């Protein structure tokens, strides 16, 4: 550490230099991220209220009430009735909370297992590792949809929970959540839906008259849901969301911190101190956009998705992994060759995509920061690289 402090000017100059390496959303390079530039007023408000700490909710009862207001509104959006919920650091923490609840509700199971799709996010592997739960992974069919027969076959006396994904990380696929609800009917198994990405896409796609099968609390047996404001919700980082149908579970399984200055509140969190400003910033997004504002955001992303899929279909040598339901596009080779060279060549040209080697696909997430102009430049480069690599052979 240096001896004396620097001036503000010196510090800001140093930071500009050090952070010049970072990519920016408006550059167009970031095509494979599920995060985006937060809503402008949300950023302003976040700075203003940055010191609010929901780790001690009694000290910040206004922010605590605001969190309840947001949870209630979002709960209704997800067809929940009187549910409870909380902001988290992101989808990983929300999924970890769900996995912990699944285990805690079944103390009689000595070797607990949770059934998850192979396409589930790595946060479930992390949670299983931390909680000493055995994950039973369900195969996908060749079209990347869940194999429901395999799903059923993995359920046994040790199953304390099942997971479905509403918007997979790799392809934005929505698992057959109604059917899974039927499979676990009368089985006393905790059912968690990971809609970390899809949670702020699917409700608005529905309102835009896209037929989406039931995926949220409208499915009777769904117990909890993850939906992240810091992905398609335009919230600030960190903003995840955990929603739970039965509030009594908090009494049964929540943590207590007896020493808090603001008094004792039961909670599910892995973290203690947590940013109230994230909640306040998202309240601002909800107030600013309303349903119609979100519909417009999704409409724009889907129009750009349609443009991208059309361009991909025109390039010989590559194809779509599946027809996208939402704004997540998987690109694979027509002849089955590995996508690794394609990914690294695109990377060298400055395009940062997600690479899913298991599914042999590269992924574009058509986030709100991705413009038509970015996609035109990207697909022009994509066409050149595909030709160079002779993927048409
Ligand atoms: C479906 C899904 N769930 C959970 C997560 C984890 O979210 P986070 O990175 O906010 O922890 C992701 C991240 O992309 C995701 O796609």
Image (spheres, grey):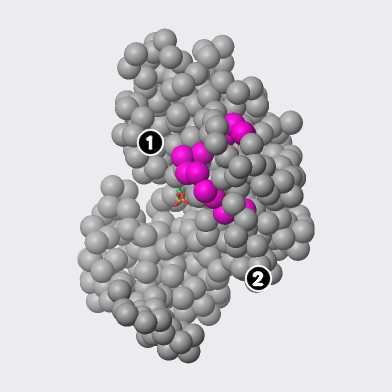
At 28% from the left and 47% from the top, the residue drawn is: 358
| The N terminus - image quarter | bottom left
Which picture quadrant has residue 118?
A: top left
Q: Quick check: marks 2 and 1 in contact, CB under 8 Å?
A: no
On residue 287, the disc is none
Q: Position of residue 22 (x, y in %)?
A: 39, 76
Taking the magenta stretch, the answer to whether it contains residue 265 is yes
Q: Which residues are magenta?
A: 264-276
Q: Is residue 41 left or right of residue 250?
A: right
Q: CA distance from mark 2 to mark 1?
A: 34 Å
Q: Main secondary structure of the magenta part?
A: loop
| The C terminus - image quarter | bottom left
At 45% from the left and 29% from the top, the residue drawn is: 100
Element at label 1: helix
Mark 2 vs 1, N-terminal side: 2
User: What residue would you read off at disc 1?
Assistant: 127
| Of the two numbered discs 2 and 1 in the rendering, the one whose residue sits closer to the viewer | 2
User: What residue would you read off at disc 2?
Assistant: 44
Classify 10 Å Cα crowding around label 1: few (below 14), some (14-19), many (20 and above). Answer: many
Q: Position of residue 377 (x, y in %)?
A: 45, 80
Figure check: 293 above or below 9: above
């Amino acid at each position: 550490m240096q001896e004396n402090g620097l001036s503000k000017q010196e510090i800001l100059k140093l930071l500009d230099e050090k952070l010049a390496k970072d990519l920016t959303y408006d550059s167009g390079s970031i095509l494979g991220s599920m995060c985006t530039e937060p809503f402008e007023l949300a950023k302003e408000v976040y700075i203003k209220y940055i010191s609010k700490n929901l780790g001690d909710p009694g000290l910040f009862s206004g922010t605590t009430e605001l969190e309840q207001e947001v949870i209630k509104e979002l709960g209704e959006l997800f067809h929940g009735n009187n549910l409870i919920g909380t902001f988290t650091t992101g989808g990983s923490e929300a999924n970890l909370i769900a996995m912990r609840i699944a285990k805690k509700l079944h103390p009689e199971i000595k070797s607990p297992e949770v059934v998850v799709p192979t396409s589930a996010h790595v946060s479930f592997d992390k949670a299983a590792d931390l909680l000493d739960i055995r994950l039973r992974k369900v195969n996908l069919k060749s079209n990347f949809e869940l194999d429901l027969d395999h799903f059923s076959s993995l359920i046994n006396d040790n199953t304390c929970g099942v997971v479905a994904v509403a918007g997979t990380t790799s392809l934005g696929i929505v698992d057959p959540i109604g059917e899974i609800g039927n499979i676990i009917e009368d089985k006393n198994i905790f059912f968690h839906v990971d809609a970390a990405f899809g949670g702020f896409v699917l409700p608005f796609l529905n309102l835009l008259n896209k037929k989406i099968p039931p995926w949220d609390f409208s499915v009777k047996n769904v117990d909890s849901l993850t939906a992240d404001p810091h992905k398609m919700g335009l919230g600030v980082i960190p903003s995840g969301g955990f929603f739970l149908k039965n509030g009594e579970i908090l009494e049964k399984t929540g943590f207590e911190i007896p020493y808090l200055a603001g008094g004792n509140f039961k909670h599910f969190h892995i973290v203690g101190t947590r940013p109230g400003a994230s909640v306040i910033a998202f309240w601002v997004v909800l107030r600013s956009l309303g349903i119609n504002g979100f519909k417009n955001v999704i409409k724009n992303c889907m129009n750009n998705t349609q443009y991208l899929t059309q361009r991909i279909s025109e390039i010989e040598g590559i194809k779509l992994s599946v027809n996208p339901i939402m704004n997540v596009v998987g690109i694979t080779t027509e002849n089955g060759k590995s996508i690794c060279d394609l990914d690294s060549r695109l990377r060298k040209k400055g395009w940062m995509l997600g690479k899913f080697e298991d599914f042999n696909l590269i992924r574009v997430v058509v986030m709100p920061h991705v413009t038509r102009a970015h996609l035109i430049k990207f697909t022009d480069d994509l066409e050149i690289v595909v030709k160079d690599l002779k993927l048409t052979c």
